[in-house]
């Protein structure tokens, strides 16, 4: 048998979106058996994302009570289906699960008619990472880089993929590589921190915004060249004054807030600069101004990413020895719902700087 964590309805009925917070529930389910090209993975760590809180609030598409939670995870291969090529090579490997399926390698978007389906808590895909055992197609996992701890490996998939596409695929090589000036807004969240890690490793001059001076200072310690509080009057001018000699504007802004981002980008970006938007948590609408048109600002929406981008991201992390930033690791068993609930509270309160991870099945010989 296998333990797994789900959400449960209250009083047996779904609640109204935004007016409910579904409780966690522990269930014992049959241990899955790998079929065809599937691997059987014993999960050892999983990480939270904002979508997991949204699911509990019924604010995310496809909410279901019949699929285990969480999209991020790492585990050890303990079995293989009959159609897995060279199955013996997988045995005992520590692997990172691709956080979604349905998007192979198109630069434009998912190829499958069903769209991109993300692991954890929705009716669109029947697998999640907050469980003891899960089966995955062998083509949907990557061997975890050796330099990463279990918690770091679990923290990487969704935010790493989202950050990679927003910075590399959307902002482009010229605007995100060596010597480029990149602004990352709202530093502290998992995606923003991965963008910071990637851009610094690529030799860009990276600056950040936050409402917290403490978070700005932590970002500088991670390699940012500087940062400002967006609550400060005239912060845009102050930020431009920090740019290195020869730079008058930013080449790219990687934004997870939305709201007035286009208006601000007119002041901050070079002519033809890129505003790459991977989230709009501040406001669901973002007006496109004539000033942005006249400056040839390129606004590009960005989601998670393809299987190819996931592989490319993992290879870059491996080559550059990049480590995701971890805010807190909870080492516990899956039946400790109260402690796991506390990790969700961290996410709800926005108090974290980096990822929130649950370790619940330590690998023999794994790094701590």
Image: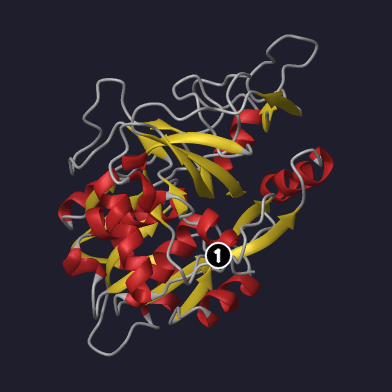
Residue at numbered disc 1: 210
Relative side of 334 to 110, left or right: right
Q: Which secondary structure lies at badge 1?
A: strand
Would residue 226 appear left or right of 291 to someone viewing this image? right
Residue 265 versus residue 248 in the image, above or below: above
Question: Compared with residue 243, is residue 274 higher up or lower down, i.e. above or below?
Answer: above
Q: Position of residue 1 (x, y in %)?
A: 68, 28
Residue 11 appears at what percent x and percent y?
80, 11
Whole-percent x, y for residue 159 in the image: 46, 52
Residue 67 appearing in the image: yes
Query: Across the whole image, how many numbered discs are drawn on residues?
Result: 1
Q: Residue drawn at (46%, 80%), measured in percent from left and top?
A: 223
Q: Quadrant of residue 12?
A: top right
Q: Nearer the viewer, residue 226 or 147?
A: 147
How crowded pointer 1 is (Cα within 10 Å; few <14, some 14-19, many 20+) is rated as: some
Q: Is residue 118 above or below residue 146?
A: above
- Choose top left, top right, bottom left or bottom right for residue 356: bottom right
**Is 261 drawn above or below residue 172 in the view shown?**
above
In front here: 181 or 342?
342
Q: Where is residue 181? Give x, y as percent.
A: 30, 74
Horizontally, residue 53 falls left or right of residue 97, namely right
Q: What residue do we see at 41% from left, 26% from top? A: 35
* 287 relative to 175 in the view: left or right: right
| Residue at the (50%, 19%) spot, across then down | 123
Evaluate whether residue 287 shows in this view: no
């Amino acid at each position: 048998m296998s333990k797994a964590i789900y959400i449960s309805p209250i009083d047996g009925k779904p609640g109204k979106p935004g007016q409910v917070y579904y409780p966690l529930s522990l269930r014992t389910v049959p241990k899955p058996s790998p079929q065809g090209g599937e691997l059987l993975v014993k999960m050892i760590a999983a990480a939270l994302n904002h979508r997991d809180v949204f699911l509990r609030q019924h604010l995310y598409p496809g909410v279901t009570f019949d699929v285990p939670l969480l999209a991020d995870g790492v585990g050890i291969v303990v079995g293989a289906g009959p159609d897995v090529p060279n199955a013996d090579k997988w045995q005992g490997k520590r692997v990172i699960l691709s956080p979604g399926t349905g998007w192979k390698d198109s630069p434009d978007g998912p190829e499958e008619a069903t769209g991109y389906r993300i692991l954890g808590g929705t009716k669109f895909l029947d697998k999640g990472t907050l469980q003891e055992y899960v089966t995955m197609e062998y083509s949907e996992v990557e061997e975890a880089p050796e330099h990463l701890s279990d918690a770091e490996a679990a923290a990487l998939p969704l935010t790493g993929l989202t950050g990679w596409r927003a910075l590399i695929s959307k902002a482009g090589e010229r605007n995100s590589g060596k010597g480029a000036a990149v602004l990352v807004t709202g530093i502290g969240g998992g995606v923003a921190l991965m963008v910071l890690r990637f851009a610094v490793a690529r030799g860009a001059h990276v600056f950040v915004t936050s409402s917290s001076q403490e978070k700005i200072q932590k970002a500088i310690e991670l390699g940012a060249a500087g940062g400002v509080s967006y609550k400060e009057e005239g912060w845009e001018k102050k930020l431009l004054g920090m740019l290195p000699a020869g730079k008058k504007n930013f080449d790219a802004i990687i934004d997870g807030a939305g709201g007035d981002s286009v208006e601000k980008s007119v002041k901050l970006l070079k002519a033809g600069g890129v505003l790459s938007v991977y989230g709009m948590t501040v406001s669901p609408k973002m007006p496109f101004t004539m000033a942005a048109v006249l400056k040839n600002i390129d606004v590009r929406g960005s989601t998670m990413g393809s299987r190819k981008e996931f592989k490319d991201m993992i290879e870059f992390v491996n080559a550059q020895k990049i480590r995701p930033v971890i805010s807190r690791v909870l080492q516990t068993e899956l039946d400790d719902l109260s402690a796991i609930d506390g990790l969700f509270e961290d996410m709800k309160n926005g108090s974290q700087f980096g990822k929130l991870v649950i370790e619940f099945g330590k690998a023999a010989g794994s790094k701590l």
